[in-house]
Image (cartoon, helix red, strand yellow):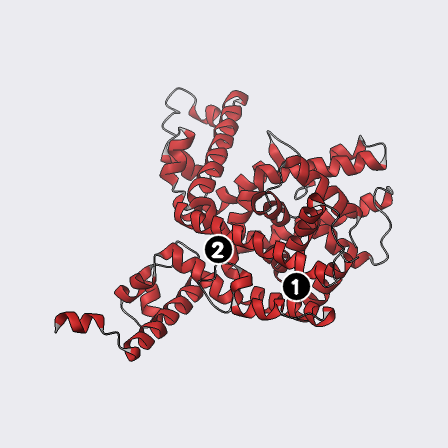
Amino acid sequence: MVVASRTYVSPLRQQRAEANRLRVIEAAADLFAERGYSGARLCDIAERAGVSEGTVRAAGSRSFLLLEAFRTRYAGSGGWESLDEQETARSIYDIDEPEAAMEAVVDFLARGHAASAGLWVVIRAAALTDAEVAAGFAELVQLKGESFLHTTRWMTGLGLLPEPVDDDALRSLTDQVTVAMSAESYLLLTEDHRLDDGQYRSWLRRRLRGLGP
Amino acid sequence: MTADKGEEPVEKRRYVSPLRRERAAETRAGVVEAAAEMFLQHGYEGATVARIAAAAGVSVDTVVNTGPKPHLLLDAFQARSTGEAGPGTMVGPSFGPAVAAVTGPDEALDMVVELVAAAHAASAGLWTIIRATARTDPRIAEAFDELRQSRDASYDAVVDWLVDLGAVPAPADPAAHRLDGRLALSAEHYHLLTADCGMDGAEYRSWLRSALVSAG
């Protein structure tokens, strides 16, 4: 009987576990953004999520929670390996009409950064000094690089960006796209220079079109 | 005060020995530099006064007398970016003296690129820590606001100066041009390009140069 009860996975229990995990991620996102990496302890996250500390531990280490909170806020779901495998992003890459594609990219970034840029600041600073965050961050940066390369190729294919003549030109174009689409540009524009959402979108369109063929 | 045990204590207190003042300044610079290292290694919270004291080779009291931790963080950034030991900064007024020596537009652009790249290389990590800490510590937040204002004013002045010299084309839209200039010159873009995109110093310099020329 004991063995049987272990192998049986209750759909209800599984659903509840997933709901709890999402609450933990949300609570972690709020607390890391409010208090910074070192200011948000597992017990604080448990209290905010209304779950036990054991449930928080089961969801992941503190460094994992920070990165997962960012992924969830930025792209709408966590655990992605690369943006082109993520649901929302993939539905954008399916668009083949250039103007609609440009608008979809601008909308994805404006929403994603608005929800996650505060966490990005925390991650970047924590990655300088915390070995675990640094390891997760290195993976994230790697994926980010692949995603921007993928996005650059996709926009080139749609005629939104010039066809690079060689690998160096592709790398240089990808760097330009990376800078334009970055959380860093978003933060500078909206936090430091007080652009509102509409103004940020206009800036991003102008910047991307400026790279155009 | 315990040091003033000799005769004529009043006289001794009033007299400030140049040697002692010089040593005090050296000690102070040492503490600030050790603080910079500890902030970069351990973060704002993790850089304890004890760690800073150990790294500087001074007593905890000496660190405490140098200033509270928020001041140490800001001083560490200023020291690294304006550089007693290093290059001029775009955040402070020390950009001034180098300007007088410039003779032509290309030289002006080279100088700006060089100064900015060197200042960021020395201080961008601390800037990242200040930005993150400003979100949670009101004392840092206030100073961060002031730093950003002086940074913006100084970047605008640099961009205007480059336009006046003909080092970059006159912009059709001056406001958009200034905004692009502020982004191009930022520590945030430096950090993004060198850390995430893997550019080396020469690649960053060449990127910054063309970003300034094509801004707006």
Answer few, some or many: residues within 10 Å of disc 2's Cα (few below 14, many 20 plus, some between 14 and 19). Answer: many
Q: Earlier in the sequence, mark 2 or mark 1?
A: 2
Chain containing the residue with disc 2: A
Name the quarter where the N terminus of chain B is drawn.
Answer: top left
Answer few, some or many: residues within 10 Å of disc 1's Cα (few below 14, many 20 plus, some between 14 and 19). Answer: few
Q: Is residue B145 visible?
A: yes
- SS at circle 1: loop
Residue at 26% of width from left, 77% of height from top? A10
Residue at 26% of width from left, 74% of height from top? A9
- Any mark on residue A122, and which? 2
Chain containing the residue with disc 1: A
Three-letter code, disc 1: Arg
Residue at 72% of width from left, 60% of height from top? A208
Please indicate whether residue B103 sits to the left or right of residue A195 in the image.
right
Q: Position of residue B196 (x, y in %)?
A: 57, 47
Instruction: Give the labeled residue for mark 1.
Output: A194
Instruction: Work out which residue is located at the far bottom of the displayed protein and give it.
Output: A12
For the residues tagged 2 and 1, is the chain the same?
A: yes
Q: Position of residue A15 (x, y in %)?
A: 33, 77
Q: How far is disc 2 from disc 1 in space, using C-alphas?
A: 20 Å
